[in-house]
Image (spheres, rainbow, N blue to C red):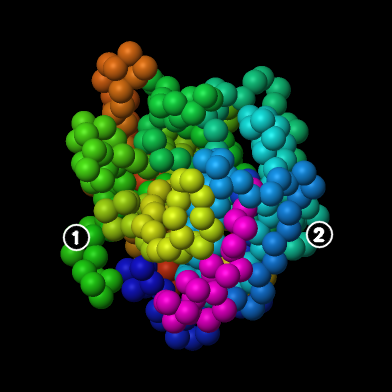
Amino acid sequence: MRRAYDLLPLLARGLDGRGRTIAVIDPYGSPTLRHDLAQFDRALSLPDPPSLRVIALPGLPAFDGADPDATAWAEETSLDVEWAHVMAPGAGLLVVAVPVGDGGLQAFAEVERAEELVVAHDLADVIVASFGQAEPAFPPGAMPSLRRGLELARARRVTVVAASGDTGATQVLPDGSCCYRDPVVAWPASDPLVTSVGGTRLRLDGAGAREAPDTVWDEPGSVVGGDPRTTLGASGGGRSRLFPRPAFQDGVAGTVGDHRGVPDISLSAAIDGAVVVYWSFASDWAQPGYHLLGGTSEAAPLFAGLVAIADQLGGARLGWVNGRLYALAALGPGAGIVDVTIGDNRESFRDEEGRWVTVPGFKAGPGYDLASGLGTVDATRLCFALARSPRQEEDR
């Protein structure tokens, strides 16, 4: 993965995120995280992080192996932490485990509280959010209180990165079933204060060299032995219903129209080409050991690691980076943003009556698109370009 994203020249120069901290905010967290990261590091010959701090917010229940949600979030926490560490092995790591109660708005209120805690107490330079909910699931008037942490992060120059989702051009319904029948995007990835990270599929040889150009992540169920007509996973993308087009997307107005477009950038997410993740907790839903995971929950911590390195390189927090990313993309691939022009993010699924539904999605093409955003990255070029780029007007 490091070779595929041209990270090795940075690491060779000691540009590994040292002096910076990446915060991962996840419901529940993982009960065995310290042990698991140490094992993961030994297996991959990685150094231990300079620090790993875990904060459990009040009300966090004990890990329950019979609870599938607790297991899923423990897996998610392992993925976020281990792969942010792969990309920025010199950065400190902070995990904030939040109680989710009955889910829904209560869960997002807890996440907002965690964001405010991290930013107000100056605990991290980059925040990773590998979760989201479809915009229509939020009642009118809910956003102002849920965005306070994001607004504080922008004011304090803390970068917030969020996964765009794994169901292509639509999103999961509030009851957890799949899916809305028309294009829908998820918040917080749709928020203009957040850098939204979509998914690609890499085709690499055993040494990490590309055998073909990156494509938009959109995989059939047959990848894991399922029905080939079903979408296993696809890069979240589309137009927001909550937010108008922000100034940083004025240059791509022909694609996004009057709405905020998602995603901004994309990295590896495919299951065919998944990353290795280790955990040692046992539950009714997962066994200890090494596992293969993917999704935009992989892509988001990968990008967060690069932001930490760019912060180190520039000697200061970049903070909100969306304006810089779009300005750099206009300069061409020499600035570290590599166009993705192949694939789409359609989503096909069976509804509760057993009927097949396909949400057509959006196609990749030259320049910005609603499947891959601006494209993917060359880490060395992008980190140097981000560190040297001037602040955009809307960043002031």
Question: In 3D space, how far apart are the residues under numbered discs 2 and 1 (Cα atoms)?
Answer: 45 Å
Is residue 45 a member of the stretch shown in magenta? yes
x, y percentage for residue 17? 57, 74
For this rendering, which residue is in front, 169 or 286? 286
The earlier-in-sequence mark between 2 and 1 is 2
Q: Which mark is residue 97?
A: none
User: Which residue is tagged 1?
Assistant: 212
Which residue appears at 53% of the width and 67% of the height? 36
The quadrant where residue 377 appears: bottom left
Give the structural element (helix, strand or loop) at label 2: loop
Q: Is residue 340 visible?
A: no
Between 15 and 285, the one lying in front of the other is: 285
Residue in view at x 65 percent, y 59 percent? 95
Above or below: residue 353 compared with residue 396? above
x 50%, y 74%: residue: 39
- Highlighted magenta segment, given as a residue range: 28-48
Tell me, for residue 121, which label it has, or none: 2
Quadrant of the frame with the N terminus: bottom left
The amino acid type, in three-letter code, at marker 2 is: His
**SS class of the residue under badge 1?**
strand
Residue 130 locus on image (x, y percent)? 54, 48
The spot of residue 108 in percent (x, y) is: 67, 37
